[in-house]
Image (cartoon, rainbow, N blue to C red):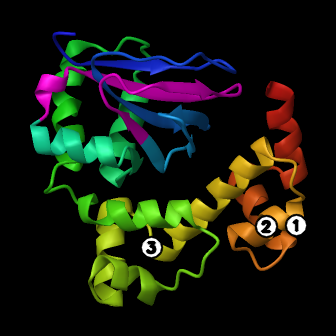
Amino acid sequence: MSSPSFNLRCYGRASSVDRHAFAQWVLPVQGELAFELEGRCVRLDRLQGAFVAPMAGHAQSATDHDRFLIVDCPASIFDADTLARLHRQPVLALPAEVRGMAQRVNSTQQEQVDDDTVRRELPRLLQAFSLAGSATRLQAVCARIEHAPGEAWPVERIAGEVGVSSSRLHALFRQAFGLSPQNWLSASRLRWARGRLASSDASIAQIAQHAGYSEQSALTRALRREWGMTPGDYRRRYRSAQ
């Protein structure tokens, strides 16, 4: 690959493992994606994307009405430190500026995005995940929350993980993501719960408990509010797509 490209893509219900010599961002703009990266299964949605390092094995599965911005880049576009950092932590909390960029590109309704748009938007993406990016210092704590969303995550604990005061943490999250820390935590818990509804036979009550909800009804309210369906509806929809 000699130059970066942007593609808007809808994935099918399953794929085989793929590897390629270029780097790639996977940025959801609609729906969600079950994504396997080097044997690790994660769930991507509008708040969480992924970076695929060169030659990293990956596969995915989506349902209907999903859409993703795929950014392919030659590895030479990155400095060694940035490429290594993204390789170590490939599941990415998406900054508000990146989500906005993905939505702008999606609004063009082009599958193969034109070169002018790539030249205009790519620097914003690279800047967002540089050391100076607004969300860079928060990526590590977002990853820890993503691994264990059911744990107690009061603002004081999150602030301690980042090494700032609670008030400063709120400012950093608002600047980076346009959300409060607790709203980010709520999204992580719901993402984790959706993944278990889709991939496990655990009861809805068990999933709610392990995701950090006080009771099953709290999960039901959250999923209905954000996705317009109950946990049972969500499980049936995803299982029927497999």
Secondary structure type for disc 1: helix
Span colored in magenta: 50-78
Badge 1 amino acid = Ala
Q: At label 2, which amino acid type do we have? A: Ala
- CA–CA distance between discs 3 and 2? 22 Å
Q: CA distance from mark 1 to mark 2?
A: 5 Å
Residue 20 appears in the picture as rendered:
yes
Q: Using the rendered view, name the quadrant where residue 223 is placed.
A: bottom right
Quick one: label 3 or label 2, which is nearer the N terminus?
A: 3
- Splitting the image into 4 quarters, where does residue 111 fall? top left
Residue where numbered disc 3 is placed = 180
Q: Are marks 3 and 2 in contact (CB under 8 Å)?
A: no
Mark 3, other Cα within 10 Å: few <14 / some 14–19 / many ≥20: some
- Residue 72 x/y as whole percent: 30, 21
Q: Secondary structure at mark 3?
A: loop
SS class of the residue under badge 2?
Answer: helix
Q: Disc 1 vs disc 3: Cβ atoms closer than 8 Å?
A: no
Q: Give me the disc on residue 208.
A: 2
